[in-house]
Amino acid sequence: MGQTITQPHEPICKLGDSLGFAMTGIAKAMPSEHVDFLDQWLSDGKHGEMDYLANHRDVRVDPAQLLEGAQSVICVADRYPHQTDLPAPDPAGRIARYAWGDDYHKVLKKRLMQLADTLREQYPDQQFRVAVDTAPIPEREHAHHAGLGWIGKHTLLIHPDQGSWFALGVIVTTLLITPTVDSLMSDHCGSCTRCIDACPTNCITPYQLDASRCISYLTLEHRSEISTDLQQQMGNWLAGCDICQEVCPHNRPRPQIDTAPYHERYTPRPPAPTLNLLEVLNWTAADRQQAFIGSALKRMKLEMVKRNAVIASGNYLQDNTNAPLLAKLRDLSMDFNESEMVRHTAKDVIKRLDQPSS
Ligand code: B12
Ligand code: SF4
Ligand code: SF4
């Protein structure tokens, strides 16, 4: 680790460009400036069932805990598509955009590994630790320090020209590199409150999320039954939620966002942008596996997908008539071959639908 000369960031950012990342930047590896915020957030239980966020708290707040002698954090933003012409079935369950193509953990990580390998060849005495969600590290905070954007009121990283449809990845390294920016990008949210107003579960307070109420958390991370009041606010989301980003003025249609390139493996393919709810309710384990091959959604258990499809179907049937869908929900509510979670959720939904409307 003897190297103490600071390396310029330009060649590393160029390498990032050549690997197809939309943005690459370097931040000084330093402890989080928001440890008190994180501790309060955790003690308020806003992480829901995501125990891993509390378990690795000490590592999360200091990159040197992840890699001894860490000096720099190389941050990349990888654009994924936000529009598609693929047809939507009826009744449809929505899939969030980050999961429209191949799994970003794989697509991004492979290229980040290539970047790390190139740097390892150039600096054999230095250590490089790659992370794409996989390590306890606040990727947005480091990306903000690297000049890739500011953290919006919905808590996501946004670039003023390029919007927020990005996945992030980092390389923590012992290599000393000049940071890409001297000062932090200013906050461009101003007096806007669109994401706060549009969030169906009211889980955004400026710059803070009650993740335990976020539809993304409920559909993807919450492994047990979902409370009745939240079910009714989940609309037709099957996996994830994009509403706070859809309404953000910094994602408004314009050429630098709409025609910007993204990695070909992110090209939308089924299950993008929606899945047929009745089909999902009839899925077997093999159907789920087949539908999610290569997708970030392959981590979602069958019973979670079905629970979400039951909820989305219930919300659909509040305003639409669909006899086969209703019949399927009734079957599920009495089917002891289904998991208890799916059966109970179907019972809950049927009870609501059977209530006379006032
Ligand atoms: C857990 C998690 C979730 C949880 C909780 C989200 C949350 N806001 O905390 C759930 C499941 C809800 C979730 C949802 C989504 N997620 Co998520 N998630 C993560 C993960 C794995 C950890 C985040 C975390 O530690 N949260 C705990 C909170 C307290 O930490 P934090 O908000 O990062 O805050 C830290 C700092 O930012 C700082 N801080 C706090 N306030 C402020 C204020 C300012 C001004 C500054 C500078 C710093 C700062 O303090 C904190 C302590 O260190 C990250 C990957 C990673 N390792 O970072 C992806 C990540 C944040 N998710 C991502 C995405 C894409 C999503 C979804 C859009 C997916 C979807 N379509 O459904 C939604 C968006 C919901 C939303 N509005 O945030 C991307 C974000 C890309 C971007 N442009 O910012 C990430 C970075 C994954 C990735 N590798 O690309 N996610
Ligand atoms: S992802 Fe959906 S539920 Fe979560 S904060 Fe954004 S709008 Fe709200
Ligand atoms: S919708 Fe408005 S308040 Fe929310 S992140 Fe975008 S600019 Fe900021």
Image (tube, grey):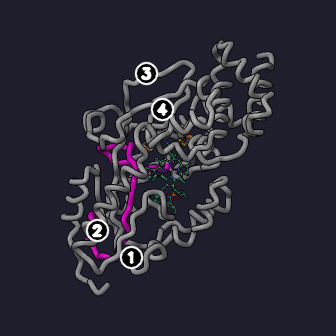
Q: What residue type is disc 1 on?
A: Ala
Q: Going by the image, does 268 lie left or right of 39?
A: left
Q: CA distance from mark 1 to mark 3?
A: 47 Å
Q: Are marks 4 and 3 in contact (CB under 8 Å)?
A: no
Q: Is mark 3 within 8 Å of ligand 1?
A: no
Q: CA distance from mark 4 to mark 2?
A: 39 Å
| Secondary structure of the residue carrying numbered label 4 | loop
Give the number of the disc on residue 70: 1
Give the number of the disc on residue 87: 3
Q: Residues within 10 Å of mark 4 (few under 14, many from 20)?
A: many
* Residue 167 painted magenta: yes
The mark nearer the N terminus, 1 or 2, is 1
Q: Nearer the viewer, residue 12 or 125?
A: 125
Locate residue 4, reporting x and y percent: 26, 84
Q: Going by the image, does 37 lie left or right of 164?
A: right
Locate residue 27, reporting x and y percent: 34, 67
| Secondary structure of the residue carrying numbered label 2 | loop
